[in-house]
Image (cartoon, grey):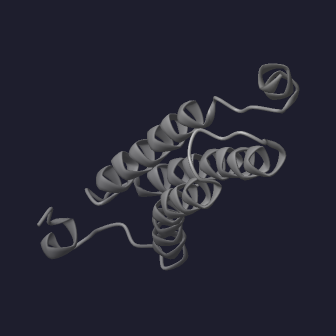
Amino acid sequence: MARWLQALLPREDRFFDLFAAHSRAILAGATELRSLLDGGEEVLRHCKAIIEHEAAADAITRDVLQSVRRTFITPFDRADIQDLITAMDDAIDEMQQTAKAITLFEFRSFEPEMRSHS
């Protein structure tokens, strides 16, 4: 009897695919941010790309949060899903804020300390 009930309940198995897609957006944004720090005429192009990756990540975040609300059975705890996607989105939001500040203040070159990996 429980099987037919579970068959009727909405189940979402694509959370992992959505997390992977969001991770790719974060990586793409981070790659653009790193390239941006090389400075020069490409700074604005990199800023624009970061903003585009952040917009894509926001769409994925909305999809995850909507799926959590409408899904009865999730692969792991709802709060954990929400916390994970929110933390992931916060990371790319910070990249976007950096890109906006660089655009606003018209930076085209960066000190070595700003480019340091450590």
| Relative to 60, 101 lies left or right | left
| Relative to 85, 95 lies left or right | left
Q: Nearer the viewer, residue 14 or 87?
A: 14
| Relative to 100, 95 lies left or right | left
The residue at 56%/30% (across/down) is: 17
Task: Pinpoint residue 117: horizontal percent, then vertical percent.
Answer: 15, 62
Q: Is residue 8 above or below residue 72?
A: above
Q: Is residue 113 above or below residue 95?
A: below
Q: Is residue 5 above or below residue 45?
A: above
Q: Is residue 71 above or below residue 97?
A: above
Q: How many labels sit on residues?
A: 0
The residue at 72%/53% (across/down) is: 65
Task: Pinpoint residue 1: horizontal percent, then vertical percent.
Answer: 83, 22
Residue 36: image quadrant is bottom left
Residue 102: image quadrant is bottom left
State which quarter of the image contains the C terminus: bottom left
Kindly give the residue lying farthest to the front in the view shown. 1
Q: Nearer the viewer, residue 109 or 48?
A: 48
The residue at 82%/33% (across/down) is: 10
Q: Nearer the viewer, residue 36 or 18?
A: 18
The residue at 25%/56% (across/down) is: 38
